[in-house]
Amino acid sequence: QVQLVESGGGLVQAGGSLRLSCAASGSSVSGYVMGWYRQVGNQRELVAKIFSGGTTTYADSVKGRFTISRDNAKNTVYLQMNSLKPEDTAVYYCNAQAFRTYWGHGTQVTVSS
C-alpha cells in the first residue's frame, strides 16, 4: 500500500512560481510511473509524468513552464511550476502507477491575475 501526500500549493500571482511535492510512504515508488494531474470541477487532466528511468511527458499547456522530477532516495516527486497563469488554478493531485494506482488527496493552487 502506498500513501501519497502533496504539499506546496497556495495562492500566487500570475507570473509567479510554486513547487509542489509529493511524498510517498508505505513502499518505495522508484519503480512507479509518477504523475501530476489537476482538476477543475469534474475535469481531471494529466499535467506531467515521469517514468522510472527519468523520461518525462507534459501536457502541451504546461510545456516549457513546468518541470517534473523525482528523488528516489527521498521517495518524493516534485512539480516545479514557473510562469504561472490564472488558468493553472486547480487542485493538483499526485499519482503513482504500477500494478495498482494510487492517488493523493490533492493540494490547491490558485493563480491570481
Image (tube, helix red, strand yellow):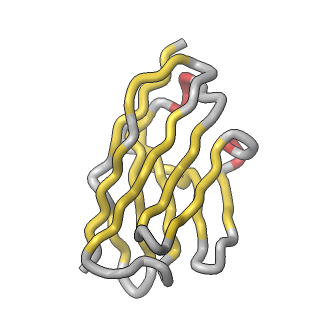
* Residue 15 vs residue 87, the one in the foreground: 15
Q: Split into 4 quadrants, where in the image is the N terminus?
A: bottom left
- Extreme-bottom residue of the structure: 99
- Extreme-top residue of the structure: 113
* Residue 43 vs residue 31, the one in the foreground: 31
Above or below: residue 86 compared with residue 75:
above
Residue 81, given in percent of the width and then of the height, sits at 58, 39
Above or below: residue 86 compared with residue 56:
above
- Tally of numbered discs: 0
Q: Is residue 80 left or right of residue 9?
A: right
Residue 17, given in percent of the width and then of the height, sits at 56, 31
Q: Residue 61 occupies which quadrant of the picture?
A: top right
* Residue 59 vs residue 6, the one in the foreground: 6
Residue at horizontal 42 percent and vertical 33 percent from the top: 109
Above or below: residue 62 compared with residue 17:
below
Residue at horizontal 39 percent and vertical 52 percent from the top: 93
Above or below: residue 100 compared with residue 39:
below
Q: Is residue 4 left or right of residue 47?
A: left
Q: Split into 4 quadrants, where in the image is the C terminus?
A: top right
- Extreme-right residue of the structure: 64
Residue 37, given in percent of the width and then of the height, sits at 47, 52
Residue 88, given in percent of the width and then of the height, sits at 54, 32
Residue at horizontal 38 percent and vertical 30 percent from the top: 10
Q: Is residue 106 left or right of residue 21?
A: left
Residue at horizontal 41 percent and vertical 70 percent from the top: 75
